[in-house]
Image (cartoon, grey):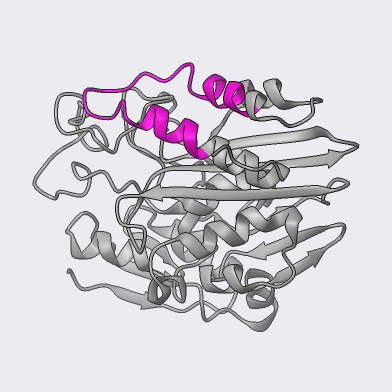
Amino acid sequence: MQPFVLSRPKTLAEAAELASARPQDSALRAGGIDLIDRMKEGLEAPARLVELRWLGEADREVMRALGPEGDGVQVGALVTLAQLAAHEGFGEAHAALREAAGSAATPTIRNAATLGGNLLQRPRCWYFRHADLVCLKGGSACLAVSGENKFHAILGGGPSFIVHPSTLACALTALDARVEIRGASPRTLPLAELFVTPKQDAKREHALQPGEVLVRAILPKPGPEQRSGYAAVKEKQSHDWPLAEAAVKMSLQSGVMTDVRVALGHVAPIPWRSREAEAVLEGKPPSEALFAAAAKAALAEAKPLRDNAYKIPLAQGLLREVLHRVAGVPLPE
């Protein structure tokens, strides 16, 4: 690891100024889990780390907030995954976020990893993470296309086939979250607009500009009788990266599903919202046959590579499981 300067600004404005002064040589640090990994792996060597955990009281309060915000809920960027997983204020309406946070990594990592870091972490593709290889993120070709692609994208891939690594992003997509960003021009945008597809720019995964800081996520007011859920499948359930994730939100009144959201994770370069599955479910009573049809619709456009076609039935089964649980319909024997 190369030497670096550690700066501890007292305000978000100062942090943004430090990060934007030399954008190619600076990095923002919260929990630092992924950033330090990349530095150890020789992938990045920032000359300056801008530490966000030492902000003054006013800015720190915003970035560590976890609780009501107007009619909705706010989650500061410095809130840890462990805090999210243990938060008693998340009822059925926001259960997907609590379940996603509790499933990620290990207890030790969850105590340090933050919402902001989880959303903005970089891909775990082994070609990208190998300092001696030059993949599309630094070169001209995605090495997974002709190489080992067991864990890569089956939806929305090309020219890069990375999968987005954020567990929280899948749940927050289903929950219609927005994110607040501070910088030269503060802005709030839907979570989906935070992420950049490889077709838009194969070199990056998010839309933050130099000097911008992700401050918090905001969940809207829950709909009537809203409920949600999340699940993931891993090779090693204790601490591995997911092979696939599914998150669902719906309101269930008078036996009919409304305001349905379906999101899939670790199957695409961005958190993948399935409007096709939502269209199958919206306005209908829950049933085993309907859930099977929605799962089929969600993966209808999948284009697997040589080694990852298994993700299609895996993601379909996972989505069906979450739909059954959230809607309260017993799983078939």
Question: Is residue 55 something one can see in this rendering?
Answer: yes
Residue 175 drawn at (x, y percent) = 68, 46
Vertical comparison of 221 with 138: above or below? below
Question: Is residue 177 something one can see in this rendering?
Answer: no
The quadrant of the picture occupied by the N terminus is: bottom left
Residue beneath the point at 62% across and 20% down: 276
Residue beneath the point at 46% across and 65% down: 18
Q: Is residue 331 left or right of residue 209?
A: right
Q: How many marks?
A: 0
Vertical comparison of 248 with 17: above or below? above
Residues 105 and 124: in front is 105
Residues 33 and 284: in front is 284
The quadrant of the picture occupied by the C terminus is: top right
Vertical comparison of 101 with 204: above or below? below
Residue 87 drawn at (x, y percent) = 66, 72
Residue 104 drawn at (x, y percent) = 44, 61
235 in the magenta segment: no
Residues 181 and 72: in front is 72
Residues 96 and 138: in front is 96
Q: Is residue 32 left or right of residue 96?
A: left
Please identify the quarter of the rendering in which residue 255 is found.
top right
Q: Which residues are magenta?
A: 291-318
